[in-house]
Amino acid sequence: MDDERIILKIIQEHDRTDQMVISRAYGDGGLEPLFPRLIRASGDQLGNEHATMSRYGIWANTVRDNIRHSSFAPLNPEMGA
């Protein structure tokens, strides 16, 4: 299967309008800057470290929390909600 078909298959599988589910299981996301956490995860991956998967999980939760926050925040706070 070529790359384009793989990407289209992934998009089709996850193309939903479901509400975002917010888990309370891990409080490790937050609104921290995204790239420092991604860099730590990728650095662990390069070094074959044991914390790689957990760091990617924390990064994914941070992405989720930033998206969730941005969808509720006005683009220009001076214009109101």
Image (cartoon, rainbow, N blue to C red):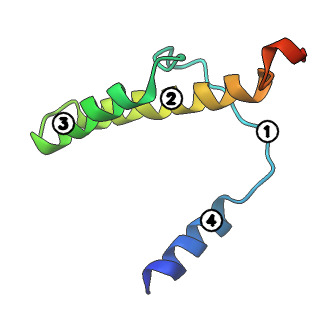
Q: Circle 2 sits in a helix, a strand or a loop, which is it?
A: helix
Q: Residues within 10 Å of mark 1 (few under 14, many from 20)?
A: few
Of callouts 3 and 2, which one flags the residue occurring earlier in the amino acid sequence? Answer: 3
Of callouts 1 and 2, which one flags the residue occurring earlier in the amino acid sequence? Answer: 1
Q: Circle 4 sits in a helix, a strand or a loop, which is it?
A: helix
Of callouts 3 and 4, which one flags the residue occurring earlier in the amino acid sequence? Answer: 4
Q: Residues within 10 Å of mark 4 (few under 14, many from 20)?
A: few
Q: CA distance from mark 2 to mark 4?
A: 20 Å
Q: Which residue is mark 2?
A: 61
Q: Residue at x 18, y 35 (%)?
A: 44
The amino acid at mark 4 is: Ile
Mark drawn on residue 19: 1
The amino acid at mark 3 is: Gly
Q: Which residue is mark 3?
A: 43
Of callouts 1 and 3, which one flags the residue occurring earlier in the amino acid sequence? Answer: 1
Give the quarter of the figure containing the C terminus.
top right
Q: Residue at x 54, y 19 (%)?
A: 25
